[in-house]
Image (cartoon, grey):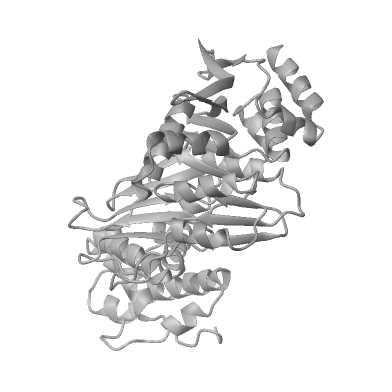
């Protein structure tokens, strides 16, 4: 234990009672004095923490630290005559390491690749989303103070503070996962924490077909849309797979293009070599220094991008997004929260009005019709599956109304014997308004073949 010289050293306080002395005095071991298992674990945890040097802990690799802590636990259990088997010692050692270097009991959930979301509703109610279904996890924090310490460590990691005076914070973990924390008095049942896990594996269209998110012909059509530089909006609700679909579409971008990404919290996993990533900055504790998505969008257009990709358009930056799509940055993409492709257009119009109050509705709709080529609707359905439910082309204007054509529309045929929804796509064979673009990129035959396959 030369690397951790303070492990196992005695701290100030009463020395442990030797076994012989205790027996001579007629005393019984602690476990026989009615000490409960929970109390024994709490005592062991406190004793271990008092014998650890924080500086040594911070500089020790997690695997080595776990072995050292386990050895220390065995020594203390022997000294204090606390009965613990090997499994309990390993479990307590892992718990202490997670508390000191990680996110406490959440570490096991973060390491599970099947879990997409972690929702902490106070110290004793933790929910997870696994395979599209939300369920309660057996994982618990010891108490509200334990959860608060973990929340404060997350906030401190991004230079923020979380307490009663600043009770809400957005942060990002080291692996890229997004975190939102709400503290009392706003949170009534102890601190609340929501973690959207960052996928370690990049997902392409082949994987999406395997997951049942779309059929091969729909995937082929979307691949063609990405290759021929259509301006695309991906619409859907929370957790519907918008960012995953955007990542898959981005794989169709030519490696020679310069891409500028604008995100509120960095989630995109672009594989191209020439990518410039921009991320917003929240205001400081004094309320100064905030950099919004609109600020980044304005700057992105000065950086000579071939394409601009916005992780999610939420407010007045929608106007700058349309400007980018209308000024030679073909192939730009973004996501938006809405229930249908038609609703997505209405939301974009409303967001533009938030920042440009003087523009009439017709002028905004004309901008939208001229900028956006395709809207893809994603949905998390009741069986837990995430699917593309609608692919709509923006055809143009007729009077004051934007005309749309549903290239694909998912229809539900009921529930199969395995509990999964049975769906089929209704296909429109109308000639798309961007046919000339398909011809320009030599993809009109591939588009026609994909549409024929979709009808079979």
Which residue is more in the foreground, 412 or 291? 291
Residue depicted at x 39% and y 72% = 159
Does residue 90 appear anywhere in the picture? Answer: yes
Q: In the displayed structure, does residue 124 sit left or right of residue 366?
A: left
Q: Quarter of the image holding residue 216?
A: top right
Q: Where is residue 362 in the image (x, y as percent from the top left)?
A: 42, 33
Q: Where is residue 293 in the image (x, y as percent from the top left)?
A: 45, 56
Q: State whether residue 213 is above or below residue 80.
A: above
Residue depicted at x 55% and y 31% = 376
Residue depicted at x 53% and y 63% = 299
Residue depicted at x 33% and y 75% = 47
* Number of disc labels: 0
Q: State whether residue 319 is above or below residue 162.
A: above
Which residue is more in the foreground, 246 or 316? 316
Q: State whether residue 456 is above or below residue 296.
A: above
Q: Quarter of the image holding residue 424?
A: top right
Q: Where is residue 242 in the image (x, y as percent from the top left)?
A: 52, 39
Q: The N terminus appears in which quarter of the rendering?
A: bottom right
Which residue is more in the foreground, 323 or 128? 323
Q: State whether residue 158 is above or below residue 314.
A: below
Does residue 114 appear anywhere in the picture? Answer: no
Q: The C terminus appears in which quarter of the rendering?
A: top right
């Amino acid at each position: 234990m030369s690397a951790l010289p303070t492990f196992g050293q005695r701290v100030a306080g009463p020395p442990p009672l030797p076994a012989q002395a205790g027996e001579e005095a007629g005393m019984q071991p602690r476990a026989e004095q009615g000490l409960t298992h929970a109390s024994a674990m709490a005592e062991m945890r406190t004793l271990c923490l008092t014998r650890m040097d924080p500086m040594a802990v911070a500089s020790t690799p997690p695997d080595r630290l776990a072995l050292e802590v386990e050895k220390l636990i065995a020594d203390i259990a022997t000294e204090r005559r606390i009965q613990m088997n090997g499994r309990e010692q390993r479990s307590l050692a892992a718990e202490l390491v997670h508390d000191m270097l990680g996110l406490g009991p959440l570490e096991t959930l973060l390491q599970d690749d099947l879990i997409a979301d972690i929702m902490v509703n106070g110290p004793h109610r933790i929910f997870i989303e696994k395979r599209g279904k939300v369920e309660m996890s057996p994982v618990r924090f010891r108490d509200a103070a334990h959860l608060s310490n973990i929340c404060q460590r997350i906030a401190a990691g991004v230079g923020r503070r979380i307490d009663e005076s600043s009770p809400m914070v957005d942060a990002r973990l080291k692996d890229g996962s997004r975190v939102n924390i709400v503290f009392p008095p706003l949170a009534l049942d102890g601190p609340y924490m929501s973690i959207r896990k960052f996928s370690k594996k990049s997902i392409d269209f082949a994987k999406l077909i395997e997951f049942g998110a779309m059929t091969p012909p729909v995937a082929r059509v979307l691949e063609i849309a990405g290759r021929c530089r259509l301006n695309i909006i991906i619409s859907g609700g929370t957790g519907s797979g918008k960012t995953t679909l955007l990542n898959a579409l981005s794989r169709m971008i030519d490696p020679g293009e310069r891409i500028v990404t604008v995100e509120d919290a960095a989630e995109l996993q672009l594989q191209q070599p020439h990518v410039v990533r921009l991320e917003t900055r929240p205001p400081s504790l004094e309320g100064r220094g905030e950099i919004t998505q609109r600020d980044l969008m304005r700057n992105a257009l000065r950086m000579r991008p071939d394409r601009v990709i916005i992780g999610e358009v939420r407010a007045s930056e929608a106007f700058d997004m349309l400007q980018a799509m209308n000024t030679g940055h073909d192939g730009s993409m973004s996501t938006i929260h809405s229930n249908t492709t038609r609703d997505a257009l209405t939301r974009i119009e409303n967001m533009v009005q938030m920042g440009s109050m003087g523009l009439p509705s017709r002028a905004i709709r004309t901008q939208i019709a001229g900028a956006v080529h395709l809207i893809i609707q994603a949905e998390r359905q009741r069986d837990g599956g995430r699917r593309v439910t609608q692919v709509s082309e923006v055809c143009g204007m007729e009077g004051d109304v934007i005309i749309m054509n549903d290239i694909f529309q998912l229809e539900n045929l009921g529930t199969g014997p395995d509990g999964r929804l049975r769906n089929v796509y209704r296909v429109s064979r109308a000639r798309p308004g961007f046919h000339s673009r398909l011809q320009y990129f030599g993809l009109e035959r591939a588009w026609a073949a994909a549409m024929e396959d979709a009808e079979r």
